[in-house]
């Protein structure tokens, strides 16, 4: 095929003839071999793991909004209760990141052309 650049496209028509009595199974592949495909998936999944770790490490515990307005004004909350609430909020944020990354991971693993 001809080289293709970001702002250009190219195409070719290809005909496949099967002059046998047996059905031909044909499939376009992105990579030359299954080994190349497995290496690319492994690389992408490693990148995804690195991205997940970086996003989790970027969470600043000091930025967690405890939303004091939603706490009962009649109740007094000690430091231990506030720390537990803060940890639950941090874990919820980590869980949100993990779910997002897991959706991408599943898409990579399920992609037949990758």
Image (cartoon, rainbow, N blue to C red):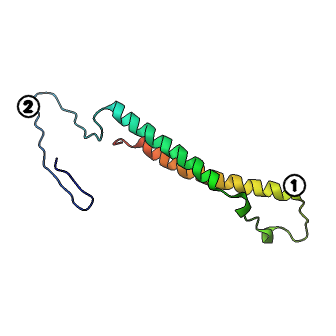
* Picture layout, residue 67 above or below residue 100: below
Residue receiving disc 1? 80
Q: Does residue 67 show up?
A: yes
Question: Do the residues under discs 1 and 2 have CB atoms within 8 angstroms?
Answer: no
Residue 50 picture location, percent across and down? 54, 45
Q: Does residue 64 show up?
A: no
Quadrant where the C terminus sits is: top left
Query: In this view of the protein, which residue sits in the foreground, 90 or 99?
Result: 90
Within 10 Å of disc 2 (Cα), the crowding (few <14, some 14-19, many 20+) is few
For discs 1 and 2, the disc positioned in front in the rendered view: 1
Earlier-in-chain disc, 1 versus 2: 2
Residue 32 picture location, percent across and down? 27, 35
Asked where in the image residue 36 lies, by quadrant, the reply is top left
* Picture layout, residue 53 above or below residue 5: above
Residue receiving disc 2? 19
Q: Name the residue: 10% across, 28% down.
A: 20
Q: Is residue 16 left or right of residue 39?
A: left
Asked where in the image residue 43 lies, by quadrant, the reply is top left
| Disc 2, SS | loop
Q: CA distance from mark 1 to mark 2?
A: 78 Å
């Amino acid at each position: 095929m001809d080289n293709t650049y970001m702002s250009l496209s190219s195409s070719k028509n290809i005909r496949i003839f099967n002059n046998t009595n047996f059905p031909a199974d044909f499939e376009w592949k992105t990579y030359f071999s299954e080994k190349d495909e497995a290496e690319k998936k492994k690389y992408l999944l490693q990148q995804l793991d690195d991205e997940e770790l970086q996003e989790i490490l970027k969470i600043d515990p000091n930025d967690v909004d405890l939303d004091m307005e939603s706490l009962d004004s009649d109740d007094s909350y000690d430091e231990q209760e506030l720390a537990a609430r803060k940890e639950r909020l941090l874990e919820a944020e980590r869980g949100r990141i993990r779910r997002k990354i897991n959706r991408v991971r599943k898409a990579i693993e399920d992609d037949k052309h990758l």
